[in-house]
Image: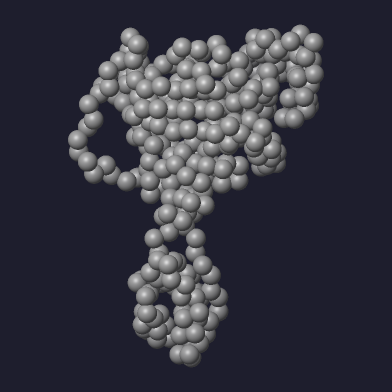
Amino acid sequence: MIQVTGLSKHYGSMKAIDDVSFHVNKGEIVGFLGPNGAGKSTTMKILTCFTQPTSGTAEIAGFDTFENPDEIRKRLGYLPENAPLYQDMTPQSYLRHVAELKNVAAKEIKSQVEEVVSTFGVSGFSGKLIKYLSKGQKQRVGIAQSLLGNPEILILDEPTVGLDPQQIHEIRDVIRDMQGKRTVILSTHILPEVSMTCQRILIINKGKIVAEDSTKNLLSRFHKHNLYEIEVGGNKADIESTLSGINQVVRVELKREESDSVFVYEVETEAGTDKRREVSNAVVKNGLGLLSFQTVSLSLEEIFLELVTEEVTDPKEPTPAPPRRGINEEEGET
């Protein structure tokens, strides 16, 4: 459904994105993550035909973003980070206007507007001028407009920003329900949102894709060792001696002291080994009190931070790609 190949965008000497390639299957929901300035917005602007790449190609539903932008726009719903709402219109009139711009059939405009107003909880303020709405209310209007025209592809940039917890939960449910029905790229800084709604994750950093996989597979790839957190009662020296003496334990670290005789340790063992029984047996056998024991999982946030804070080890910069079809813009944002 979406195929990106060797996509680069340069603003003068600055590389907003550099040789980016990825795909999104039909009906798939994919999270697009990266720190500010990583290239997320630039990539989405190319996919939505707002700007053109310096080199490479992007195809949506079989249409090239350079050759067939009008065909793509017919099939695409887009929520930019700051939705372009007309402040002196009401949500109701604005949504009707957007439906007309999207060439929704006149006989279907009323029903489509009513559907998105209901789905995204806009009905309670649909008659107020947009300039008087709260940030969360404006965001819901922005999301609602992206669904007008029944697009088969959605590109959503920070869809839950400004919403309260209940609204966030509702929007996540709506996005999850799209799986298999629409193709969705979801850009967000809220990492739990990705794990709750997306089947696969793309992580971009410094203009390059640094990871592409399911949440489960990413967690597995970065789990180099097994980690346990254990709360033990007894003499501190005896506890550390016992834990360190267990075969295949590579690290024992005191995390906190609960009291003079109760300590919490993080125990790390070699990858591929389940040492829970050995650790608990050793503690009990040595007369220590086993108060709690849990496996520690590496979080998606920790993986994300590890990927985006790595230093580039290859000092060689790739040769800039030649301009694509005469496109050579000099200003923009990433």
Q: Is residue 61 in view from this perspective?
A: yes
Q: Is residue 133 in view from this perspective?
A: no
- In the picture, residue 56 is in which quadrant? top left
- In the picture, residue 39 is in which quadrant? top left
45 shown above or below 23: above
263 shown above or below 137: below
Quadrant where the N terminus lies? top right
Left or right: 13, with 55 as reference point: left
Residue 256, percent across and down?
45, 70
Quadrant where the C terminus lies? top left
Query: Image point 51% across, 13% down: which residue?
Result: 69
Say which of 8 and 83 sits in front.
Answer: 8
Left or right: 103, with 207 as reference point: right
Residue 95, percent across and down?
70, 16
Left or right: 31, with 141 as reference point: left
Residue 240, percent across and down?
38, 80
Query: Image point 61% across, 15% down: which residue?
Result: 74
Query: Image point 38% across, 41% down: which residue?
Result: 210
Say which of 217 and 100 sits in front.
Answer: 217
Query: Image point 75% across, 19% down: which residue?
Result: 113
Residue closest to the far left = 316
Residue 296, percent across and down?
49, 64
